[in-house]
Amino acid sequence: MVHSTGRRLAALLAAAAAALAALAVAPCGAQPVSAPPIAARAFFLVDTLSGSTLAAGSENDRFDPASLTKLMTAYVVFAALRDHRIEAQQEVKVSPAAYGAQGSRMFLDPAHPATVAELLQGLIVDSGNDAAIALAEAVGGTQEAFVAAMNREARRMGLANTHFANPTGQPAPGHHTTARDLARLAAALIRDFPDRYPLFAQKEFTYNRIAQSNRNRLLWTDPTVDGVKTGFTEAAEYCIVAAARRGERRLVSVLLGAKSDTLRTTESQRLLNFGFQAYDTRRLYRKGQAVASPAIYKGTRSTVPLGFDRDVWITLPRDHFDGLRTTLETRQPIVAPLAAGEKAGIMRLMRDNAPIAEFPVVALEEVPVGGFLSRGWDTLRMMFLPSP
């Protein structure tokens, strides 16, 4: 059965606003807008409301992540804080391994323990390798156990081309990721730990009487940028994951292998500006909004409301929202029992008779099996239904 809802769609698009959750949708029929040339070895740009990719280049190629590794280090530490396995004001002794860390540091002193809160600032603002080791030891007991947790999280997130060998980002065999995987990791960090994420917008941190500035220069040049992390090694060159929020939209960009700090900043800004200016993201349906109430058989009620288990957003080129049309295809006949949240159909979005996207439609309410008499009656009724 197909329900046309074209007239309603225009009003829904005009009313698009904030959402608490997003349904990941990849437009399949809209002609993408060509991204500007980006001076980097790999890049990726995603709209986190819809999950749509807006620009990409060599996004699945493996690279040394350098200090972008610390995004996963932070994620695992944030999870430990959430689960009360450690506490923010807990003091951590500085081990010889942490004190002897090479590369960027927050300058820990083995004679003075640091709190987890201080170590997180040292990790995120200073990009301290000593902070990364101290946190890994505090959470995992050993660096090796902590790295195992990092890789478990990577698998859980579906980061198919990512593997970590240490919590710092120092070059090592088997330590690699991709631009696409880093964007997914950053989006998960922002989504799962909104209370901790503001640390990535902190511009300066002073520890042990040494003041250091965040290396993400976009925090100074673009007020809509609120994170997330930079990285550099000789092999990785200059890298950055940046996130910006303008209105309700949030974009995450990844840039790997730029030739200089200046290029990493300007090219990331170019990528973000492109995404905001060339595309728009609008909400089509709200979570729990009923879009149809088809008949259901052999249940305790005669109809069931169908809708979405989260807000539905779509990202398209700005001039592609006119002429959109939706059709709802439901499985027929629908027979009880039907659980709330169970998939019952597909909403297809069309433009000029070409598919743009599709979204699963679920039952908004549970419909248990009906009594003996109602089941028998519906069995007879179903015999006279038209063939699908």
Image: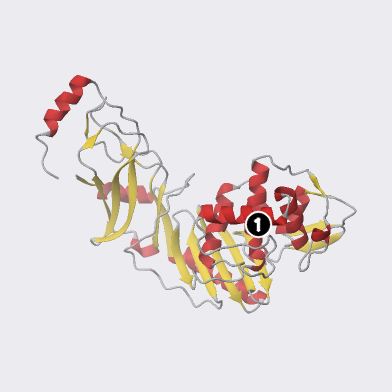
Scheme of image coloration? secondary structure
Q: Is 244 on the left-hand or right-hand side of 1?
A: right
Give the residue drawn at x 69%, y 41%. 85
Do we see residue 245 in this rendering? Answer: no
Query: Can residue 180 be seen here?
Result: yes
Find residue 286 and report its image quarter.
top left
Residue 322 in the image: state x and y as whole percent.
Answer: 31, 59
Going by the numbered disc 1, the residue's amino acid type is: Val
- In this view of the protein, which residue sits in the foreground, 359 or 34? 359
In percent of width and height, residue 11 lies at 33, 48
Quarter of the view holding residue 311: top left
> For the point 54% across and 67% down, which residue is it?
178
In the image, is 58 to the left or to the right of 313?
right
Residue at left offset 55%, top offset 49%: 191
Q: Percent x, y for residue 309?
A: 40, 41
Q: In the figure, 332 relative to 327: above or below?
A: above
Image quadrant holding the N terminus, namely top left
- Badge 1 marks a residue whose secondary structure is helix
| Rendered position, 313 above or below 320 | above
- Badge 1 local density, few (<14 within 10 Å), some, or many (20+)? many
On the image, the x and y values in percent for residue 7 come to 26, 48
For the residue pair 344 and 1, the one nearer the viewer reads as 344
Residue linked to disc 1: 147
Image quadrant occupied by the C terminus: top left
In front of the other: 245 or 168:
168
Q: Is residue 370 above or below residue 45?
A: above
Q: Name the outermost residue toward the right.
A: 111
